[in-house]
């Protein structure tokens, strides 16, 4: 397995492809799955915009989310600081591959039904939303095979999340990843990405369902003793419910067979410049192993709509 280059934590020089993309994801979750969230910043320089998404969710909480796909590109080509109407966000790699800090001051949308986010103009309550969070590496950084330039890092996550007048202390786990390169055509390709941690400190990440009828996938399992096993096969089955939100999923990879129960969704609707639609539901989830171990993490399904609303 190739070693991750510390220099790749920084932004990269784009090519001239319209949908050339560079993204940073940061996920977090409480050990008991009672609270979690994520943020994504996605640079699309040839469209002169950044997609910024952030959310806070819980099984018994309303979704609070920011989805702004028209954030201006930073003036500094190396900056990870974003400013838009009602939004300020900054992301600092304090120590490459070891420690990252993310901050947000924004107004989010609180919705009763997560599927509301599939509307072109979702309805909800405008609420102050922010966080001050730190991701500390909790395992080896994993370099993807040469499918696309990408690496993933399991983490512990600490800090606080502010929603209106409420403050939530975060002392949990999560994942961060960084990818860049050729066009990411959300509207053509399917996938199921996930990352989580079981109660014995087994950490895992997989991406599968990339090719119809194939178990090809990528990812890793890091055991309690910190040994990393790279994966080349990922089995994914999903039972969808209303609005394409998953009711249940099953993952098989390495020696693990996991039952996945989505606990709280944070969907995003994506519109291609030519008008095509893509539904992108992410979920805080419970992962249950066949041997009785349980854990939590995040899972997503990319769902191109093939011209359908």
Image (cartoon, grey):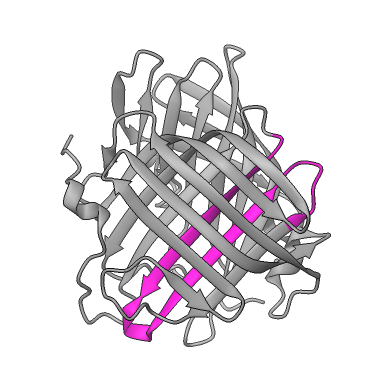
Specify the quadrant that holds the N terminus. Answer: top left
User: Does residue 247 appear in the picture of this structure?
Assistant: no
Q: Residue at x 17, y 46 (%)?
A: 5
User: Does residue 208 appear in the picture of this structure?
Assistant: yes
Count of labels in the image: 0
Q: Which x, y percent locates residue 164?
A: 76, 59
Locate residue 32: give its quadrant. Answer: top right
Asked if the stretch drawn in magenta spans residue 281, the answer is: no
Q: Which x, y percent locates residue 262?
A: 68, 41
Q: Which of these two is toward me, 82 or 26? A: 82
Is residue 244 positioned above or below 289 on the image? below
60 with respect to 85 (left or right):
right
Q: Which of these two is toward me, 7 or 199? A: 7
Locate residue 232: give its quadrant. Answer: top left
Q: Which of these two is toward me, 153 or 222? A: 153
Q: Residue at x 33, y 19 (%)?
A: 226
Specify the quadrant that holds the C terminus. Answer: bottom right
Q: Which x, y percent locates residue 119?
A: 72, 75
Is residue 220 positioned above or below 193 on the image? above
Asked if the stretch drawn in magenta spans residue 56, the answer is: yes
Which stretch appears magenta?
Answer: 34-63
284 with respect to 229 (left or right):
right
Q: Residue at x 59, y 64 (%)?
A: 105
> Of helix, strand and loop, which mostly describes the magenta segment?
strand
Q: Which of these two is toward me, 116 or 40? A: 40
Q: Which x, y percent locates residue 228?
A: 30, 24
């Amino acid at each position: 397995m190739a070693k991750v280059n510390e220099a790749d934590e920084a932004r990269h020089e784009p090519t001239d492809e319209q949908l050339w993309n560079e993204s940073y994801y940061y996920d977090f979750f409480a050990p008991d799955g009672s609270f979690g969230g994520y943020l994504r910043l996605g640079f699309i320089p040839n469209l002169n915009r950044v997609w910024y998404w952030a959310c806070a969710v819980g099984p018994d909480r309303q979704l609070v989310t920011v989805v702004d796909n028209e954030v201006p590109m930073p003036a500094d080509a190396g900056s990870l600081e974003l400013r838009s109407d009602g939004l300020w966000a900054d992301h600092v790699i304090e120590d490459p591959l070891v420690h990252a800090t993310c901050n947000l001051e924004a107004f989010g949308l609180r919705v009763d039904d997560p599927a509301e986010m599939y509307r072109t103009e979702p309805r909800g309550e405008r609420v102050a939303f922010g966080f001050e969070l730190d991701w500390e590496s909790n395992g080896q950084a994993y370099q993807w095979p040469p499918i696309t330039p990408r690496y993933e890092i399991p983490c512990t996550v600490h800090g606080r999340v502010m929603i209106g007048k409420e403050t939530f202390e975060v002392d949990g786990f999560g994942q961060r990843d960084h990818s860049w390169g050729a066009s990411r055509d959300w509207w053509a390709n399917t996938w199921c990405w996930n990352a989580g941690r079981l109660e014995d400190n087994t950490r895992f990440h997989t991406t599968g369902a990339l090719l119809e009828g194939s178990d090809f996938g990528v990812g890793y399992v890091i055991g309690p003793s910190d040994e990393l096993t790279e994966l080349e096969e990922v089995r994914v089955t999903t039972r969808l419910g209303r609005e394409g939100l998953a009711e249940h999923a099953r993952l098989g990879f390495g020696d693990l067979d996991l039952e996945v129960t989505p606990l709280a969704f944070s969907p995003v609707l994506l519109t291609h410049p030519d008008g095509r639609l893509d539904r992108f539901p992410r979920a805080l989830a419970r992962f249950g192993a066949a041997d009785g171990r349980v854990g939590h993490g995040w899972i997503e399904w990319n769902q191109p709509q093939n011209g359908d609303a």
